[in-house]
Image (tube, rainbow, N blue to C red):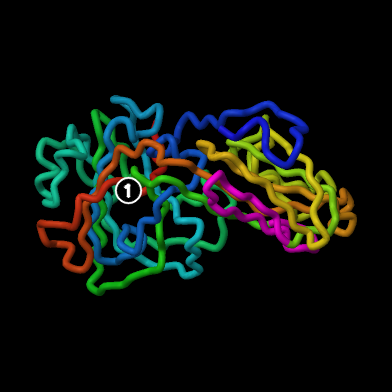
């Protein structure tokens, strides 16, 4: 949770929180529904290689809340890593298979066939050529998933799930696409995404210190009063989905990315810079607003978003893969963790 008191400022307000609910889709692992992954999967992943075999195991705790035996899975997709933009639109020959399994990470093998012993399921997305969309920007970890709808639903029997992807082009192509992933054992991850608005740069970033995290705004309006917003939610704020366009409030081209649980007042210096030092927290997002009469009719400019994740949330997943000679029976791995996945179901 973000702290309720922060060094260098005074708490102004605490706003009502909201929970994102989607009855027919969810993220695996569930803890990654509202934050970017702590590990980039690449360049060997199903969206970056035209010759590849990939097996991804999801133990029961890694499956989205709501995926229980009897649910009919209707699609899945993976989220490109927000720091790895890819303007190209590659074409891949892909087949996806889904299996119910009692396999665990401790028993997962580098031999593909061994991981399917006792599993039930099969092809859900028959081999075909797919054109991937270009990756040009990211504004929210709930968005941006490249989804694949199944030809027919797969009735989930449990307890766990194994997804197998096979890309089978006659040539070996590699695309510069990384996917958001999770890996247990990562101690801390920080980053920035989105864009600010206004006539100044308004760039927000952070640095890990021995006593905490320094979050600082650079190149904002000089000597301006400002407010640093902190929150743990980036999918919704009350009834409003995030990011929220602020055009109706006199701030055209500006976006509110973070649910504002806490606001802290400060004043930027003569260079338009300001900073706070946060204690280490589980998860926190920050976005800054500064008074700037030249920015828009409302007189406010906004920054991008900084995020902090301390420690790695549970990631009961494992994967095995092989690229150019993908038809070989033995792959590389198993590797702990894997791709953050969105599933849809009935």
The image shows residue 85 at horizontal and vertical percentages of 50, 64
Residue 263 found in image quarter: top right
Q: Can you say whether 141 is above or below 136 in the image? A: above
Rendered residue at 20%/50% (across/down): 334
Q: Which residue is mark 1?
A: 338
- Residue at image position (61%, 33%) is 3
Secondary structure of the residue carrying tag 1 is strand
Q: Looking at the image, can residue 333 be seen?
A: yes
Residue 8 rendering spot, x and y as whole percentages: 72, 42
Horizontal side, residue 229 vs residue 59: left or right:
right
Q: Which residues are magenta?
A: 196-218
From the viewer's perspective, is residue 128 above or below residue 72?
Answer: below
Q: Residues within 10 Å of mark 1 (few under 14, many from 20)?
A: many
Pick the front one: 83 or 329: 83
Asked if residue 282 is positioned above or below residue 255 in the image, the reply reads above
Q: Is residue 220 magenta?
A: no
Q: Residue at x 66, y 34 (%)?
A: 237
Q: Quadrant of residue 234?
A: top right
Look at the image and tell me in which quarter the N terminus lies. Answer: top right
């Amino acid at each position: 949770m973000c702290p309720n008191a922060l060094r260098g400022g005074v708490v102004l307000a605490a706003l009502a929180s909201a929970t994102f609910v989607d009855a027919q889709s969810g993220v695996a692992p569930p803890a990654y529904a509202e934050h970017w992954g702590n590990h980039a999967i690449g360049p060997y992943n199903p969206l970056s290689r035209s010759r590849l075999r990939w097996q991804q195991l999801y133990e029961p705790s890694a499956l989205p809340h709501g995926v229980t035996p009897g649910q009919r899975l209707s699609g899945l997709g993976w989220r490109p890593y927000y720091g790895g933009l890819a303007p190209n639109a590659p074409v891949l020959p892909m087949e996806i298979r889904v299996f119910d399994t009692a396999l665990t990470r401790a028993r997962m093998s580098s031999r593909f066939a061994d991981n399917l012993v006792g599993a039930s399921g099969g092809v859900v997305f028959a081999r075909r050529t797919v054109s991937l969309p270009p990756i040009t920007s990211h504004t929210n970890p709930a968005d941006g998933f490249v989804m694949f709808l199944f030809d027919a639903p797969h009735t989930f029997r449990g307890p766990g799930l194994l997804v197998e992807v096979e890309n089978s082009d006659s040539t070996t192509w590699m695309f510069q696409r990384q996917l958001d992933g999770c890996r247990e054992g990562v101690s801390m991850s920080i980053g920035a995404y989105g864009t600010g608005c206004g006539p100044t740069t308004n760039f927000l970033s952070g640095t890990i210190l021995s006593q905490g995290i320094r979050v600082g705004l650079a190149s904002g309006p000089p000597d301006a009063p400002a407010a640093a917003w902190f929150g743990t939610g980036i999918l919704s704020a009350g009834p409003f989905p995030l990011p929220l366009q602020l055009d109706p409030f006199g701030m055209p081209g500006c976006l509110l990315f973070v649910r504002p649980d806490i606001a802290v007042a400060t004043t930027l210096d003569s260079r338009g810079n300001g900073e706070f030092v946060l204690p280490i927290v589980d998860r926190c997002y920050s976005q800054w607003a500064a008074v700037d009469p030249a920015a828009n009719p409302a007189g406010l400019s906004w920054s991008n978003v900084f995020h902090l994740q301390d420690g790695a949330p549970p990631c009961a997943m494992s994967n095995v893969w092989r690229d150019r000679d993908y038809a070989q029976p033995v792959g590389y791995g198993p590797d702990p963790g894997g791709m953050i996945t969105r599933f849809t179901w009935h």
